[in-house]
Image: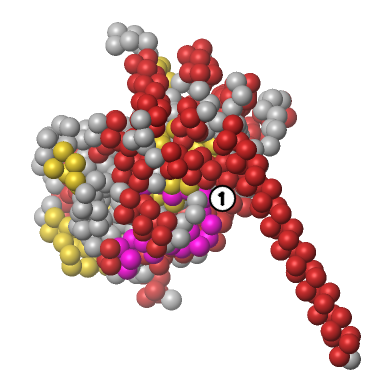
Amino acid sequence: MYKKNQKKIIVIAAIVIALFSGLFLFNTRDERRINRLINKMPLRDKLAQMMVPSFRYYKENEEAEEYPVSELTDYIKEYLSEDHYGSFTLYTENCSDPKKTLEFVYGIQQLNKESGGIPMIIGIDQEGGSIVRVNFGTIGVGNMALAATGNPDNARTMASIYGKELALLGINADYAPVMDINNNPSNPIIGVRSFSDDPQITAQFGKAFIEGLHQQGIISTAKHFPGHGNTDTDSHTGFPLISSTYEQLKDNELIPFKTAIDEGVDIIMTAHIQYPNIEKGTYTSTSTHEQIYLPATMSKVILTDILRGDLGFDGVIASDALDMDAIADNFAMKDVLKMTINSGVNMLLLPIVYEAKDLENNRAILDLAVKLAEEGEIDSEKINDSVRRILKLKLKYGLLDNIDFELNDVMIKEAETGIGNKESQDIARKIAEESVTLLKNENNAYPLNLKENEKTLIIFADTCISRIGYGELIKKELTDNKLIPEGSVIEIMPSNGSNNEECIEAAKEADHVILVYRMYSVSCLDPETDDGWSLECFDKIIDAVHEQNKTVILMTCQLPYDIARFTAADALLVTYNASILRTLPESSYAPNLEAALYSCFGLAEAGGHLPVNIPYVEGTRITDKILYQRGFSLLNIQE
């Protein structure tokens, strides 16, 4: 018996040794291959491998007409043939339909291949919900709505759908998921792009989202490190500052990022935000000439010491776009290049090309990077380390192989039938129903008890007139399919700031009233601003309807925090998102608002729970006092 066990142990040990030896040889072989590529690369090619260009619009000069870039034009061909860029970012303007998008993507890759380049990482912001670039694909419900379902499988499922659709277009990287926790309700840029204001919920759903992308072979990106959720400034248009200490970040913002790292996220994108209690280095702003703190994108403490060292991230660090005002308005490009690369950034998202001068500017940026590296101001080891990480990522996703980038009719057909198809739309719709959150229901206001020959009035606030097509959609579907009693009518109306009396009178005449409001910034809580015109009108409608002993349902269709502004309404619903839909839909749309409106007629159930705390609103101010706790829903009480 002993000898038999001894033989078994020897055999198992031999197998283990063989496996480890094979793995070691495999890793060594890969490393040698990558090192050979790096050693053959001229300095300019190494730096180009780190650069990420993009084109949205184009015009030859100030007087020329601007047009969206949706095909591979001569100036793009010339630009991309000059240098071997490592990556490329796509925007909505590049994605007009499946065929054109495929031609654009494969054209870029083929052009790069013919000029001797390495296959490119083609990235895009396909977060779902409010931020999508492939508008003809499945829009989905957005991150906060996903978390409102309480089921991380929904995040995995939606990310897998996004990943599958991107892959059909030849796109291999998604700049998603957003791993910021939305711990400041006044945040103007993250909001519903975040899963939650709770780090554990954000981590849980972000992990599932990453898994979904990886299931489809798509490169994943966690953003915006070390956290953009606790700002009241948009780094696209300003220079945010967060006063949190490192210990505070470890207890909150860094938790989702650590989870993403443990899950094997491929890229982490930086935030253009100042953290003076962590990075104390300063710089003299080129515009204000005042002392500012170095943002995370330029901080060795944040990127190398914390992200690489403390959190153990071994993947690729990408900057957010370098033409955002936080960077462009405060830093000279020479210093941007030096400080980002020397601090640990591996991929630099170049300023977006809108016109001919932007092309020249990007050429000049690469020229400048080469000059700085030759002069020793950019660390050559940092460059080599960056290229090594990028090539390692490309190897992982098969981008160092000899890929055929010839497009054929089968691929086009698969994209046309597989992207935004009914199956995917139905899944998104089901998830939307699971996310709609009922917070209040007094006087049996919800769902509507609609009788024959009664009129339901749906009024869209000025801030969401661009979503009024959802009303027309519900009206058509319920009427055409005879889902409402005989003789009943649905009337859709905008509140545009100049028709208050008309809206109030129409509401008084209706048997049932649904109000739809949209908050995208705190200015939407101020009736004195252009964004808050409908507030006073909605208040008067609620009072007028109550005077007639009738009820009002109010729903929000973006940030959920405005729900606290309308506590006088009988029923309160939160949907977390609604894409633009001015008329009946001709293409994909976010199903959140549609699902909420259906539920008002008793045709769907509001199945969600709050993924964020809802504070009280006093006047135009969001307070620190909580009105509805995270996790709350009337379902809790009803169950």
Find the residue positioned furthest to the top: 63
Give coordinates of residue 21: x percent, y percent.
73, 61
* Numbered circles on residues, count: 1
- Left or right relative to 115: residue 554: left
Give coordinates of residue 441: x percent, y percent.
31, 65
On screen, residue 405 above or below 257 = above
Range shown magenta? 249-271
Q: Residues within 10 Å of mark 1 (few under 14, many from 20)?
A: many
Which residue is located at x 36 percent, y 34 percent?
Answer: 376
Which quadrant, please, contains the C terminus? bottom left
Which quadrant, please, contains the N terminus? bottom right
Is 276 a magenta residue? Answer: no
- Left or right relative to 515: residue 579: right
Which residue is located at x 39 percent, y 23 percent?
Answer: 367
Question: Mark 1 highlights which residue?
Answer: 213
- Left or right relative to 75: residue 14: right
Find the residue positioned furthest to the bottom: 1
Front-lying residue, 542 or 188: 188
Residue 609 placement: quadrant: bottom left
Which residue is located at x 75 percent, y 67 percent?
Answer: 17
- Left or right relative to 194: residue 393: right
Residue 322 placement: quadrant: top left
Tell me, yes or no, if residue 324 can be seen here.
no
The three-letter amino acid code for the residue at tag 1 is Leu
Front-lying residue, 154 or 170: 170
